[in-house]
Image (tube, grey):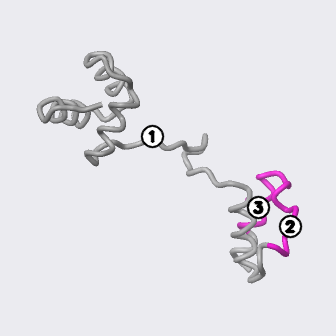
Amino acid sequence: MNYSKEVTDYIVAKYLEEPTRDTVDLLAAELQRPAKSIIGKLSREGVYRRNFYTTKGGENPTTKLEMVSEIAYNLDIPPSKLLGLEKSPKSTLKLLSEITKRA
């Protein structure tokens, strides 16, 4: 979808006032465009900020594979030597990662 310079400036200004998904939804309804189109335009303009998921503790999420790779790095061995470890509970992997950091 094409946006005129005036509409683009309006979308960017409104979004920068309050950069939330609610603002995107309001703009989409107001301009009768899909929310994805508004997000795409804001992204092309370099102003859209995606909401990132955080854990209940406020930390960035870490996958089990990333944790196993970190453990392998801490132990100075290739991750392939720890095959199957990613099936362990996340709490166990977190503990192992913390312990191996000290080693």
Q: Position of residue 21 (x, y in %)?
A: 39, 29
Q: Is residue 54 magenta?
A: no
Kind of residue at badge 3: Leu
Q: Is residue 85 magenta?
A: yes
Question: Nearer the observer, disc 1 or disc 3?
Answer: 1
Identify the mark at residue 20; answer none if there is no mark. Answer: none
Q: Secondary structure at mark 3?
A: helix
Question: What is the magenta segment's predominant secondary structure?
Answer: helix
* Residue numbers of the magenta segment: 80-98
Q: Observer-nearest residue: 16 or 55? A: 16
Q: Secondary structure at mark 2?
A: loop
Q: Position of residue 14 (x, y in %)?
A: 21, 30
Q: Secondary structure at mark 1?
A: loop
Q: Quadrant of residue 37?
A: top left
Q: Is residue 14 left or right of residue 50?
A: left
Q: Residues within 10 Å of mark 1 (few under 14, many from 20)?
A: few
In the displayed orientation, state which residue is furthest to the left: 6
Q: Is residue 62 left or right of residue 42?
A: right
Q: Which residue is mark 2?
A: 83
Kind of residue at badge 1: Asn
Identify the mark at residue 95; answer none if there is no mark. Answer: 3
| Label 1 to label 2: alpha-carbon separation | 33 Å
In the displayed orientation, state which residue is furthest to the right: 84
Where 23 falls versus 93 (above or below)?
above
